[in-house]
Amino acid sequence: MKRALLFGITASLLFSCAPKKPKTTEEKIDSLISLMTLEEKVAMIHSESSFASGGVARLNIPHWVMSDGPHGVRKEHGTDYVPDEGVADSVTYLPVGVALASTWNPALGYAYGKVLGSEANARGKDVILGPGINIIRTPVNGRNFEYLSEDPYLISQMVVGYIKGVQDQGVSASVKHYAANNQETNRTTVNVEMSERALREIYLPGFKAAVQQGYVNTVMGSYNKFRGQYCTHHEYLVNTILKGEWGFKGVLMTDWGAAKNTMEAINNGTDVEMGTDLNLGPNPDYGKYFMGDTVISLVNSGKVDVKVIDEKVRRILRIMYKTHMFEKRPAGSINTPEHQATTLKIAEEAIVLLKNDNILPLKKESLKTIAVIGANATRKHAGAGGSSQVNAKYEVTPLAGITKLVGDNVKIIYAPGYEIAKDGKADAKLIQEAVKTAASADVVIYAGGWIHGYSDAWNDNAFDSESVDKPNLILPFGQDELITAVLKANPKTIVVLNSGAATDMNAWGGKAKAIIQSWYAGMEGGTALAKILFGEVNPSGKLPMTFPKKLEDSPAHALGAYPGDANLNEEYKEGIFVGYRYFDTRKVEPLFPFGHGLSYTTFAYENLSVTKSEKGAVVTLSVKNTGAVAGAEVVQLYVKDDKASVERPEKELKAFTKVFLQPGESKQVEFTLAEDAFQYYDEAKKAWVLEPGEFSILIGGSSRNIQVTASISL
Ligand code: BGC
């Protein structure tokens, strides 16, 4: 007994003297940080290459390797920003962000992220710099194609799947650009001002969902200023909201070169400074970054507490542990048939049929000659657009997709009609050739619209591209003249447009028999387009943004609130009235409304019932396919506060689901609306409030095609 007791005491003494073996991740991180020198810590909080931050070889802490971008793993770069030649960097090119959002299918968000995550692993990347989720505030923003929507609820629903898809592969996503980065004009200098209500109701919900529902590992701070301070080291946006209110435990990295002030970066939550253009060249001195050597001096002189730096390192290590960077990386896979099938599926659900005067779907049996007109019929888009550029394994163009689908029995004749060139104007000869081609065919498929840049070179970025906004919505290269002439020569013309947002269609929109919005639909875009044209796929994409009749109808432009004044201040005067919230409340007729998209079948909305729940409502209805072919309908639920003490939008999207139905089939749909579906942000109370009263529940196939309504008193 005595001996046993003695042994017990000795053993416990021995145990308490021996260094404790770290067990939890946080303990492992504590232990690593305690072994690091200040210089090693600082090496980890700034970039050491164009796309990697520093590691600590001595402690087996790897470099953190990042890659754009939202729709594919970017071309390979060395330590600079020049794509490497002759390396194996071809990848799956997914439909761009706005195309993904047009599917209104969150499950495809996950599938999309899964492709990216697994290809990132195969390419040795730890972080994918996407998704891009800035609100589509103006149709001219050059990066709209990378973003998702004008609506915060749709963004929130799509972003969560994307992030989980990426991160379930053991790779980090980086949701960007936080925050209020809604244009490319003056993107690094503009100071955005907006009401707190607009910030909370419109610009932040997507980011909040990314953090609290998607558990995103990293967030990228934007270039612009907000209320006078750079967003990437913003006291209120980062410390108070992101890391405070939302409890974000991951890493806030800067956009490339967005850090401008060491003390602000140290104190306002910036964890990693990436990609400044300082010192690039043969012997770059990365220590010169804002979060480089200066930080070492500040800590050594006692001006900065090392604990603040430890916290940044802790966050990086936390994500490194979470993504298995200390273990063997999952092998991943690249360019697999499964990945290609995913891009095709997303493209099929993304392409939006805007208009159809009984011409689609085409029947190949009844056609002898098809004229394909427009330079985008043979254009490949993957390689351009700025940082989202990818080296696609292949890209099926519209012409290739159509040719393959129709086979040998239909003759295809092609004429470009215009030339893609800087300042390119209508070319009489090319138009004449196109008119002749159109006149000799049974039907015309016009494939035009916008491009990312004149070539794949970074410095010629134009239109749907990083760094520049579009000058207006008028199609470039004289396409209005061309389409008008083609329509005259052959009224049976279907217009297919590439673009990241709306186009001005006033010159020809009324005359075109059909209009298709094909975005930039990825490497299988041409296949998906052909299947839709010929009815092998029934279109089910819906616009994630309003298409105005003309640019001046868009709120930011109507109110003179773009692109900022001479002092680079830009007040978002429209407040919460962005997109359809503006068009519907101010009664401005759009060209095509938010949520619009046609099908080859028809749907009936029946048996709506709304029941009050504890703090919200349960809504049920049935949706029936009343046409002759299978199809999918995006059932959209909007809420209207019938009477409120503050101005509220005419309607706001609060739920949706995509229902797949065979002909004649009917399905029951149920939506559970929580309290937040009825709330607004009260600036005085600094809180979300539900003001008791009557609310309308409006359900239909677009924001302007409401089929059934009900009322509820809360
Ligand atoms: C872009 C980011 C991108 C980064 C790295 C920046 O210019 O704004 O979206 O991730 O470059 O390429």
Image: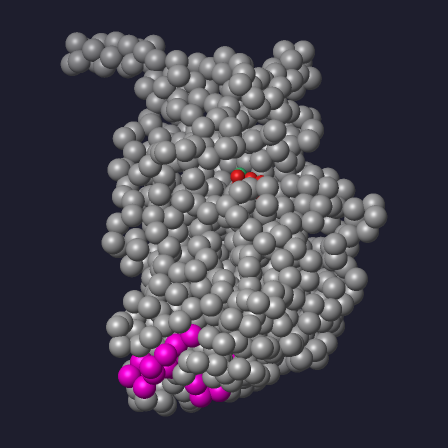
Find ligand 1 in the image and state its quadrant. top right
Is 292 left or right of 120, judged from the image as shown?
right
Quarter holding residue 85: top left
Q: Please indicate, yes or no, whether residue 374 appears anywhere in the rendered image.
A: yes
At a point 39% along the width and 22% down the height, the residue shown is 61
Display coloring: one colour
Task: Tally the numbered discs.
Answer: 0
Residue 35 percent coordinates (x, y): 44, 14
The span shown in magenta is 353-371
The one of 604 and 426 positioned closer to us in this rendering: 426
Q: Position of residue 469 (x, y in %)?
A: 65, 53
> Horizontally, is 111 left or right of 510 in the view?
left
User: Does the magenta portion include 362?
Assistant: yes
Q: Please, which residue is most extreme toward the right here? A: 566
Work out which quarter of the rendered image holds the N terminus and state it. top left
Above or below: residue 581 compared with residue 388 = below
Residue 264 on image: x %, y %: 68, 30
Residue 177 horizontal side relative to residue 96, left or right? right
* Frontmost residue, 444 versus 300: 444
Q: Residue at x 51, y 71 (%)?
A: 433
Q: Is residue 366 above or below residue 12?
A: below
Residue 408, image x, y percentages: 26, 73
Residue at screen point 61% across, 68% down: 428
| Residue nearest the viewer, comparing 583 with 597 | 597
